[in-house]
Amino acid sequence: MKYMGSKRSMLTNGLGDALSQSVAECNRVFDLFTGSGAVAWHVAQKYDREVIASDLQSYAVALAAGVIERTESIADHRWVDTWFDSARAMQPDSFFQEATVLQEKLEIDQISASAIDAQELCADVNLPVCFAYGGYYFSPLQALWLDTLRITLPNNANQRRIGLASLIIAASQSAAAPGHTAQPFKPNETAGRFLREAWMRDIQFLVKRAVISVSEKCARKAGRAVVADANELAKQVGEGDLVFLDPPYSGVHYSRFYHVLETIAVGKVGEISGIGRYPSPSDRPRSDYSLRTKSKLVFEGLLKVISEKGASGIVTFPAGEASNGMSGQDVTEISERHFSILERKVSSRFSTLGGDKIHRDARQVTEELILILSPR
Ligand SMILES: C[S@@+](CC[C@H](N)C(=O)[O-])C[C@H]1O[C@@H](n2cnc3c(N)ncnc32)[C@H](O)[C@@H]1O
C-alpha cells in the first residue's frame, strides 16, 4: 500500500544491506515508527529474530501484526468466504439495495448527482465508515462492506490479524483520495473521474487479494506489534538489540493523513468535521516529532535512552531540510552525540507525498540518509 515515508523501495536500495549487516549481530529488532510495517515485515520474514513494532496509530500496528505476530503461512483461504457471508448477513436490506442501485448507476450517472445521493444515503447510518466517509472517500456500498467486515472479523487470532490488515490495505487501495486521506476527491470536472474510478473498486476483491498476499507471509520468530510512543517503548530496549528509527519528517501530524485507516482499525469514529471529514484533533494521535519546536528535543531524548541501554541503531531521514524543523544534518549531529556512526549513506526513495493539480499523487524521488549506529 502507499504510505507517506514508506521505506519499502529502500529495502532493495541500501537499507536492506544496512539491516542485514546489523541484524547479524543483534538479539531483537525494534521498529519504533513502523508506519506501513514494511521494514518490520521484511526483517521478521527474513531473519530469525523477534521483531517488536510500534506506532502511535492503530492501523500501522494492525498492518505490522498481520505478519510479524504469525509464524505460519496460511494457504487455506476458505475462512474468507465465511467471513464475507457473516458481513453480508448483517447488512440492512434497504440500505444494501439502495447502495447497490447507486453503485450500478455509477458508470452512467453524473458523478456530482451520485455524490449527493450517496451522501444523503449515508448521513444517518449508524456505522462508522458509512457515517463518516460514505459519499466521500467511499461509495455507500464500499463503506457498508468495510463496516460490516470490520464488525465480523473472525475470532481465530491469526485470521483476525490477517483480516484486519487486509481490510486496512483494501481501504487504502480504494479510498477516493491521493496517496493519503487528507481530503477526498471532489465530484467536479477535474477530480470527478478519479472519484468515480475509486468508488467502482470492489472491496471484496481487494480484501481477498490482500488476504492471499498477507497470509503467505509470516515471521521466522513470533514478534509483537503495539500502539506506543517510541520514546516510551524505547525504555524496553536491551543491550544487544537493534533499533530501527524512521521518525516523521512532516510538520503535519500523520493522523491528519490517515484518519480513515485509523477509523477502520479501531472500528469507531467520534465527531467529524472539515473538508477531509477528520475526527476532532483531540481524537487523533499527536506527535511531538511533527512539531518544529519539539522534534529535535524528542529525537535527542530517544537516542539518549537507546544508547544508555547499549543497543545499536539504524536511522533513516531525508537528507535535506524537512518540514518538522529537522534536517539530515541535525539527525547526524544528534546521532554523533550518543553513538559511533559506523556508516553514513544516502539512498534514493520514491515519495508518494504531494500531488499535482488534479490531486493525483506524484511520485517524487527524495534523497534519504541511512546512518548505522553502534553503541560507544
Ligand atoms: C516516516 S513514517 C514511518 C514509515 C515506515 N518506516 C514505513 O516504512 O512505512 C513515521 C511514523 O511514525 C509514527 N509516529 C509519529 N510519532 C510517533 C511517536 N511519538 N511514537 C511512535 N510512532 C510515531 C507515525 O504515525 C508514522 O507512521
Image: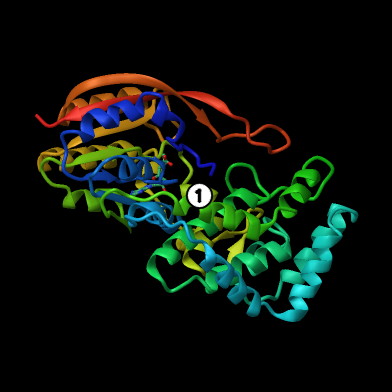
Disc tally is 1
Residue at image point 47% right, 66% down: 266
Q: Dot 1 lies on which element?
A: helix
- 160 to the left or right of 130: left
Classed neighbour count for the residue bearing mark 1: other residues with Cα under 10 Å, few (<14), some (14–19), many (≥20): few
Residue 299 falls in which quadrant of the image?
A: top left
Where residue 4 appears, as percent x and y from the top left, is 50, 39
Residue 308 visible somewhere in the drawing: yes
Where residue 210 appears, as percent x and y from the top left, is 54, 52
Q: If the image is split into quadrants, where does the C terminus sit?
A: top left
Label 1: which residue?
213
Residue 128 visible somewhere in the drawing: no
Query: Ligand 1 is found in which quarter of the picture?
Result: top left
Where residue 73 appears, as percent x and y from the top left, is 39, 54
Residue at image point 24% right, 24% down: 333
- 127 to the left or right of 222: right
Q: Is residue 41 above or below residue 116?
A: above
- 197 to the left or right of 152: right
- 133 to the left or right of 283: right
The one nearer the camera, 217 or 184, is 217
Residue at image point 64% right, 56% down: 205
Q: What residue type is labelled 1?
A: Ser
Where residue 32 appears, as percent x and y from the top left, is 30, 46
Residue at image point 28% right, 38% down: 244
